[in-house]
Amino acid sequence: MRFFLVDDDDSIRMILSDIIENEHFGEIVGEARDGSEIDTVLLSRKKVDILLIDLLMPHRDGLETIRAITPDFTGKIVMLSQVEIKELIGEAYALGIDYYILKPINKLEVINVLKKVSERIILENSIHRFQASLSQIDSLQSIKGEERPVVKERSIRFQTECQSILAELGILSDGGHKDIIDIMEILFENEDDVYSTIPSLKLLFEKVVQKNGNGCEDLQKEVKASEQRVRRAIHHSLNHIAALGLDDYTNPIFEQYASKFFDFSQVRLKMYELKLGYQVENQVPRINIKKFIQALYWEVVKQRES
């Protein structure tokens, strides 16, 4: 992701830069101390994905700047401010910002917001690619006078729906999400067999490695690496779901996915761990990879059929 920072406080820009770089969200492509220093031409030239902008600045404030750059600026906007006036916050959202972060800066809040914004961009880009692929298929088939290849379209739609759910689970930008999508594609390609039983995890990981063209001599090493990436991604998802439940037990994503993708006793344990702020000795939350894979597959199938 490409970030542009606008804030008249040098220390705030430094804190944001450190978070973005240390958490590997992307690169800082530009900074400014006032809204008057930026315009759509600059943002377009810098190919900015996410604009972080202060509300109160000396010459042109955040609201005036957003009015000046929209609707031409198509990236995401995160506003920062010490102001808690509901009318101003409401106006900011009405102008099109995606998130509002209150100062003083809380590192965990910034990380959470930037992760959500990044995942939303990834999801939207996937949808755009999906739509472009369908348009291209339509055009080619129209020229040839043939019908649209249904299997290819279903495969693209399946991937898009899978990515949408992974975004809600909080792991679309995680390193293991591609392995999980590869597993979903393998299950999709063999869906007649899957309706009776999900293959063993060992077989699935071997197929993922073979799908990506890795040599047979490194098969077991690559299988282990793929399994570790998936395990880490699912642990991150458990952390994400537990954090949602800790913040709001009635959160719709928590209600829909907590017990479906995880053993709920482990979700409660992770929530307790997050509440304490440290890991309880001999009580490490566990995940069930096969349960997660099964739940994700059937959730994608359910959305596809709805």
Image (cartoon, helix red, strand yellow):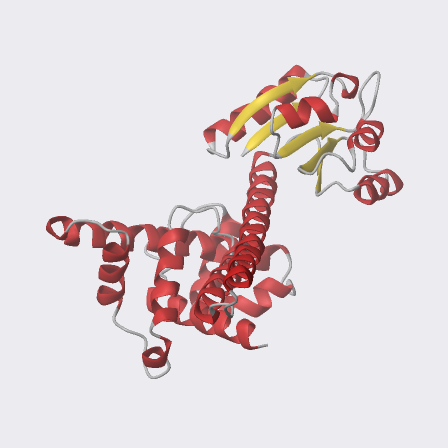
Left or right: where does residue 74 sit relative to residue 222? right
**Along the viewing direction, whichever of 110 and 31 lies nearer the viewer:** 31
Estimate the x, y position of residue 175 in percent, counting from the top left.
Answer: 39, 46
Residue at far left of view: 217
Residue at (85, 28) in percent of width and height: 64
Q: Is residue 230 above or below residue 83?
A: below
Q: In the image, is residue 10 above or below residue 305?
A: above
| Residue found farthest to the right | 87
Residue at 56 percent across and 47 percent down: it is 125
Taking the image as shown, residue 248 lies to the left or right of residue 302, namely: right
Image quarter in which the C terminus is found: bottom right
Circle count? 0
Residue furthest to the bottom in view is 196
Position of residue 37 measured from the top left corner of the image (x, y, whole percent): 75, 16
Q: Residue at x 78, y 38 (%)?
A: 71
Q: Give coordinates of residue 49: x percent, y percent.
A: 61, 35
From the viewer's perspective, tell me whether residue 260 is left or right of residue 59: left
Is there any visible trace of residue 182 in the rendered image? yes
Residue 55, placed above or below residue 116 = above
Q: Is residue 264 visible to the viewer in this orientation of the structure?
A: no
The location of residue 178, given as percent across then percent down, is 39, 52
Q: Nearer the viewer, residue 26 or 132?
A: 132
* Up-down relation of residue 139 to residue 225 (above or below): below
Left or right of 67: which side holds 44? left
Foreground pick, 132 / 161: 132
Q: Residue 284 sits in which quadrant?
A: bottom left
